[in-house]
Image (tube, rainbow, N blue to C red):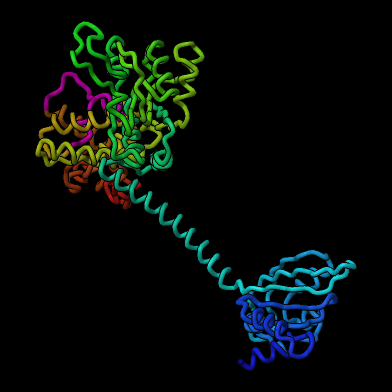
């Protein structure tokens, strides 16, 4: 028998001397891993076990015989569960902290249970205590870990998004474009139907690609269909498929439709606003019931497909005009993503142009480059055809220009006429010699370059000639008043990166 147990028995054997039952109870209480604190009905301490000593850092010789409130008054701990249970006459659980002694700062959970006798008085109070310092530490650590997990998950999502953007050569320098990509990444986590709107050529199909690539369905198929490019008589069979002998000219074995081909994947319905009322009703039924019926079929086919629809039309206005079903509109418009036109995200234009130049150079084995002047002009143009128009014009310039540098004079008239005012781009034609006409045109070009760029260095770069030549021509044509002090500015091609 240890000395500690002997001390416990000195206080626990409260019956007649030699009462082995009481001593055995003392041994049982001493073996408890939880701290035990027993008092009478007034809070006077009768006994504590070794676990209580270990947790609280106070010896039983010191505490036995004292009142529980006295220990609080002497600031050994913040409050007493025993005194709270006596006052409430019911079990009380509190959180307290050791404020004195070797266990200062220790966090403790104490549950005190009053034992009421037959007369209604409190005979004993038994308090059970546990050291929860480690539990609280682990809880805090768990909270930090969960926070880190959320941060890592967000970073991983950003990495995936960047990889998708890089793989698909998507340019996203403007805030508007980055916001759209973030929205697409967010909605990709769920299976909600998405309606992508925007003008023709803004890149609505690219948004569908991103949503599919970042979704749980990325390993499934991504099937695309343009609802305006297929005649209405054929579109139904393309969407829903047909059974054997459904109509004249049908395949003998029948055919799967786009819905079936997109099973477990994504179906992109472009130009959804061009669907007829008849097909709108069938599409609505497919979305509501998650099943389709082939043309000429009798048995419904279950489908598990995520729908991304796109249009350059105002579907809400079409609903008001009776041209589009309102129930289908609200079924499609669960999550709406509007892609802004290129004129509202002009920061993307230099990078987009460079990307198209690199792609066209690689396609035709060219080694051509774009003059900064051209980029300046592109930044001023409103691009009604958006990204598609920019790509087509870039390709046209590279293909039709003989030299390796594309200058402002090589830009198609639709852009050049918008950028350069009429009076500045006009070349006088009249009874003059060829030399005089060339000199007059040369003067106007240098004058325009100086007005636009403000320095001989930049004007020379725009005109693809030496700076000394520009200075000599300025003197010759009397254009010195148009020169300003040389300043350093950033070229549109400096710091060009693929980034989001």
Residue in front for this viewpoint, 369 or 419: 369
Which residue corresponds to the image point at 20% horizontal and 30% vertical from the top-left? 441
Count of numbered circles in the view: 0
Is 317 situated above or below 500?
Answer: above
Q: Nearer the viewer, residue 265 or 461?
A: 265
Farthest top residue in view:
248
- The relative height of residue 471 versus residue 341 in the rendered view (above or below) is below
Q: Residue 170 in the image: state x and y as whole percent.
A: 29, 40
Q: Which residues are magenta?
A: 406-434
Q: Is residue 489 left or right of residue 477?
A: right
Percent position of residue 182, x then y: 41, 43
Q: Residue at x 12, y 24 (%)?
A: 433
Q: Quadrant of the N terminus?
A: bottom right
- For residue 102, side relative to residue 405 (left or right): right
Q: Within the magenta stretch, is there residue 482?
A: no
Is residue 83 depicted above or below 335 in this figure?
Answer: below
- The image position of residue 340, as x and y in percent, is 40, 32
Q: For this view, does 286 lie left or right of residue 393?
A: right
Query: Residue most toward the right?
Result: 119
Q: Is residue 426 magenta?
A: yes
Relative depth, front residue between 390 and 315: 315
Residue 140 in which image quadrant: bottom right
Whether residue 450 is visible to the viewer of this picture, yes or no, is no
């Amino acid at each position: 028998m240890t000395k500690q147990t002997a001390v416990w028995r000195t206080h626990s054997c409260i019956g007649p001397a030699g009462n082995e039952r009481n001593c055995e109870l003392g041994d049982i209480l001493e073996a408890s891993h939880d701290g035990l604190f027993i008092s009478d009905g007034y809070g006077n301490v009768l006994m504590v076990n070794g676990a209580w000593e270990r947790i609280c850092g106070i010896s039983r010789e010191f505490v036995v015989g004292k009142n529980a409130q006295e220990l609080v008054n002497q600031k050994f701990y913040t409050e007493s569960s025993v005194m709270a249970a006596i006052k409430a006459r019911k079990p009380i659980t509190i959180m307290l902290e050791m404020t004195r002694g070797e266990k200062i700062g220790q966090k403790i959970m104490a549950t005190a249970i009053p034992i009421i006798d037959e007369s209604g008085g409190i005979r004993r109070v038994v308090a059970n205590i546990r050291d929860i310092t480690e539990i609280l530490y682990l809880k805090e650590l768990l909270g930090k870990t969960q926070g880190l997990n959320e941060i890592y998950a967000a970073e991983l999502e950003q990495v995936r998004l960047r990889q998708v953007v890089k793989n698909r050569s998507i340019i996203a320098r403007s805030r508007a474009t980055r916001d759209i990509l973030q929205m697409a990444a967010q909605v990709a986590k769920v299976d909600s139907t998405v309606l992508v709107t925007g003008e023709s050529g803004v890149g609505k199909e690219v948004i569908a690609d991103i949503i599919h690539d970042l979704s749980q369905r990325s390993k499934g198929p991504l099937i695309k269909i343009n609802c305006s490019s297929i005649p209405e008589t054929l579109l139904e069979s393309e969407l829903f498929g047909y059974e054997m002998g459904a109509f004249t000219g049908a395949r003998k074995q029948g055919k799967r439709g786009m819905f079936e081909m997109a099973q477990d994947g994504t179906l992109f319905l472009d130009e959804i606003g061009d669907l007829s009322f008849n097909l709108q009703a069938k599409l609505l039924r497919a979305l509501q019931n998650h099943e389709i019926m082939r043309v000429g079929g009798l048995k419904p086919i279950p489908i598990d497909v995520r729908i991304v629809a796109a249009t350059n039309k105002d579907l809400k206005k079409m609903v008001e005009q009776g041209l589009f079903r309102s129930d289908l509109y609200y079924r499609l418009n669960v999550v709406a993503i509007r892609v802004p036109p290129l004129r509202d995200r002009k920061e993307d234009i230099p990078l987009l142009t460079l990307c198209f130049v690199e792609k066209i150079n690689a396609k035709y084995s060219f080694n051509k480059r774009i003059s900064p002047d051209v980029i300046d002009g592109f930044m001023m143009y409103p691009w009604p055809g958006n990204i598609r128009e920019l790509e087509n014009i870039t390709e046209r310039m590279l293909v039709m220009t003989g030299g390796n540098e594309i200058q402002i004079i090589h830009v198609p008239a639709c852009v050049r006429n918008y950028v350069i005012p009429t009076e500045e781009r006009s070349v006088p034609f009249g009874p003059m010699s060829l030399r005089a006409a060339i000199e007059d045109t040369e003067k106007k070009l240098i004058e325009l370059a100086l007005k636009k760029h403000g320095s001989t260095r930049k004007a020379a770069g725009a005109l693809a000639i030496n700076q000394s030549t520009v200075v000599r021509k300025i003197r010759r044509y009397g254009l010195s008043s148009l020169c300003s002090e040389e300043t350093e500015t950033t070229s549109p091609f400096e710091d060009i990166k693929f980034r989001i």
